[in-house]
Amino acid sequence: MPSGFLRVATVGPTELRVHWVAPLVWVMGGVSLGSPQRALDGVLAGLVVYSVHALGHYFLARASGLAVERLDIDGLGASVAVRGRASRGVLARVSFGGVLANLGFAVVLMALAGGGSSLVREMLWVNLLVGAVNLLPFGRLDGASGWRHVSAVLKQPMPAPRPGREHMALRARQMVSEADRQIGHGSVRDTAAASPTS
């Protein structure tokens, strides 16, 4: 059990590990709610929400063409270890995949919360808490790597145009000039300069 993680399953090439702190957080969160029923709801809510968060990372990594070697669930969320070449933008998306999954799950839970189920309400609050905490740029949280990748993307200069490819506005002006020449009109700029102003 290196670094406190226990391997619980291997699905294809992906190893699923859970840190010993995660179940402890779920149980402590559940017990703090009071009654046995609410405690059970809290534990189940933690299990479901953390799984949704982990799957958000996994599916965004796979959709980006990356191989997921390891999926780790810890006390604050989840992370993935990926293999493959990826831009900073893709890595930022994968980093925030769990938060995006929490956001989508929150919409579903809000639609279901009107039914009065205490489990759905607990899942909604745990879901919002996990998503919000993972936006923070600290430690192992998604925000630590996600905001770093976003910052690197924003600091990069715009790529130079490829040789032989002209800017669309320049190409549009050239096409208008060619059309004017073919039909015998002066250029649009000459016509605009010659027209009287009121």
Image (cartoon, rainbow, N blue to C red):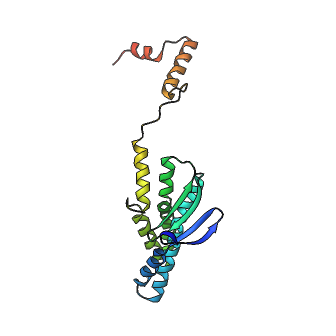
Could you say where residue 13 lies in the image, as x and y percent from the top left?
64, 61
Could you say where residue 87 lies in the image, as x and y percent from the top left?
51, 46
Q: Residue at coordinates 46% horizontally, 17% vertically from top-left?
A: 188
Could you say where residue 178 lies in the image, as x and y percent from the top left?
55, 16
Q: Quadrant of the C terminus?
A: top left
Q: Residue furthest top?
A: 184
User: Relative to residue 134, is residue 120 depicted above or below?
Assistant: below
Please state if 187 lies on the left or on the right of 7 as rendered: left
Q: Residue furthest bottom?
A: 36
User: Relative to residue 153, is residue 174 depicted above or below?
Assistant: above
Q: Residue furthest right?
A: 12
Across the whole image, how many numbered discs are drawn on residues?
0
**Which is more toward the observer, 90 or 167?**
90
**Which is more toward the observer, 167 or 21?**
21
User: Relative to residue 11, is residue 122 depicted above or below?
Assistant: below
**Which is more toward the observer, 76 or 2?**
2
Q: Residue at coordinates 47% horizontally, 52% vertically from top-left?
A: 92
Q: Residue at coordinates 42% horizontally, 84% vertically from top-left?
A: 31
Q: Is residue 176 visible?
A: yes
Q: Is residue 118 visible?
A: no
